[in-house]
Amino acid sequence: MVIQNGKTDIKIKAESKNLNFYYGTHHALKDINLKIIDKSVTALIGPSGCGKTTFLRCFNRMHDLYVGNKYDGSLLLYPENINIISSSIDPIEVRMRIGMVFQKPNPFPKSIFENVAYGLRVRGVNRRSQLEDKVEESLRKAALWDEVKDRLHGLAFNLSGGQLQRLCIARALANDPEILLFDEPTSALDPIATAKVEELVTELKNTVTIIIVTHNMQQAGRVSDHTAFMYMGELIEFDRTEKIFTTPGKKLTEEYITGRFG
Amino acid sequence: MDQLSKEQIKKLIRSHKLKDNIFEILGLILLLCSLLVLLALIIDLSTDGAARISKSFLTNFPSRFPDKAGILSAWVGSTLVMFVTAASAIPIGIAAGVYLEEYAKKNLFTAIIEINITNLAGVPSIIFGLMALGIFVYKFNFGPSILTAGLTLGLLILPIIITATREAIRTIPSAIREAAMAVGATKWQTVKHHVLPYSTGGILTGIVISLSRAIGETAPVITIGALTFIAFLPNAPISTEAPFIHFDWIFSPFTVMPIQMFNWVSRPQQEFHVNAAAAGMILLLMTLSMNAIAIYLRIYFRKKIKW
């Protein structure tokens, strides 16, 4: 979908309309209306328990793995205009198109190669040459190739925490996702590894739409183009990142940004 | 509260450490007691039976003459029965465990199934024997055969395998399932590529331990009518002529190791008691080597997986 914004056209990749989410009886997301802009980084910030991770996990229907969760409203994926959370859409189809990187690196106890190739194997690709090409390409995109090219068939667990997280990014990239979801990807990493992941996010936005949940406001400021501030399950403010961090429109946003609560 | 003085802190630590040490020593003593009893049993069995163990003891059929009697039909019977037990209980047990852990919705129906599995594990083995006598021997007309014994023992160990499978699957962090599902894997792909491979160690351990329990079971096998004296072997399962694999052995009458032992122990002659001790040693050896395999498997598979 394309919307007019002054002189330039802005392409929208996804949009939530009156999105509500319930964990059993707990109303975790309340009428979220948000547009995700194509090929850009959108940061979700807010204090713990505000619903940012819950919102993120709606995009790939991760909530479907557990019982008692309920979606309401719509979360549209463009250009097809399909409602991701509708029960008529197979969550597997959604996950084939929208990748995710988790808070704690969660590699499979398999080789580095098999970790990256797994998405392709799930899609029925078994030709060695095809797998090898894609694994190399993905590891290069994730800035990990030079560090692991000599031990592709060694166990993934022997990598450091930061390398593991980049491996998980490579695993997601191997499936050519249209949207990549990052759930606090650096919260378990040291500053150097964090810097590498952030650099990666900035590079990746040229090819893929990124949504990143973060606790770290400096991180949101560094990597994102747009920022959404959430509080108690509601979207308080959404705007360009510079705007949110310099002249926020809402008092609550300003208080959170300046560290008066959260 | 006032701050504790240095002397008071030292006194407190001393008394805590004393309790710590007392528990450690007590635990060690109790452990040694039970180990000593086991050791005494093994030594007693060995001193009685060691002299009787020879190649002919393993290759002779039972006989009226104690020095000619052997356990050929018993160990062949035990092996074949274990084969049927494993072939029936392992696939069903693993499938049931995976279903309950990964697929089943938590509702009244699955709750009832779960309670029944737990109860089944506590049912005395002779009850399984009586049930098998009614169902397998008479209703299905399997007779007192290897098939009947194998299926009976299979039912007996089914709850153990189901529980072991579930326990093993439960140790896999949900982060791994999420990782697989997030790249688009179906539930079955997640089970096949991740859940089962990563829980193999735990499942195999459970299987081997349950089989080593089944091999020592006597009551249900007697109940279904296993022979106590048998001087022939079932037809071989494999032959050099077509069709190479035969299944008529499963309907053959049989005996197993514990029954052979029981039979010898109940004879009045001292020489047969020696035979029983020797057979006991072989049975113990079979069980212990199965447990050793279980330990090895557990270590082997643990080494490859780290969360």
Image: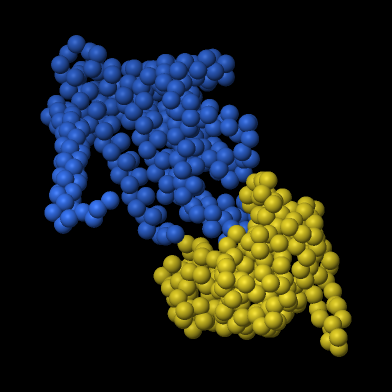
Against B24, residue A162 (above or below) is below
Against A104, residue B4 (above or below) is above
Q: Please state if A61 lies on the left or on the right of B121 as rendered.
A: right
Q: Residue at x 66, y 63 (%)?
A: A231
Relative to the observer, which residue lies in front, B75 or B150? B150
Rendered image quadrant of residue A21: bottom right
Q: Please state if A150 lies on the left or on the right of A178 as rendered.
A: left
* Residue B96 rendering spot, x and y as whole percentages: 56, 38
Most extreme residue toward the front is: B2
Q: Quadrant of the C terminus of chain B?
A: bottom left
* Residue A61 rendering spot, x and y as whole percentages: 69, 58
Against A70, residue A255 (above or below) is below
Q: Residue at x 42, y 40 (%)?
A: B207
Query: Does residue A145 appear anywhere in the picture?
Result: no
Q: Please state if B32 lies on the left or on the right of B162 as rendered.
A: left
* Residue B133 rendering spot, x and y as whole percentages: 49, 16
Q: Residue at x 53, y 29 (%)?
A: B115
Q: Residue at x 28, y 51 (%)?
A: B1
Rendered image quadrant of residue A127: bottom right
The colour scheme is by chain
Query: Does residue B202 appear anywhere in the picture?
Result: yes
Relative to the observer, which residue lies in front, A176 or A252? A252
* Residue A35 rendering spot, x and y as whole percentages: 77, 71
Relative to the observer, which residue lies in front, A203 or B89? A203
Most extreme residue toward the top is: B268
Against A176, residue B70 (above or below) is above
Give the tally of numbered discs: 0
Rendered image quadrant of residue A216: bottom right
Most extreme residue toward the bottom is: A7
Letter of the blue chain: B
Q: Report which colour depicts chain A.
A: yellow
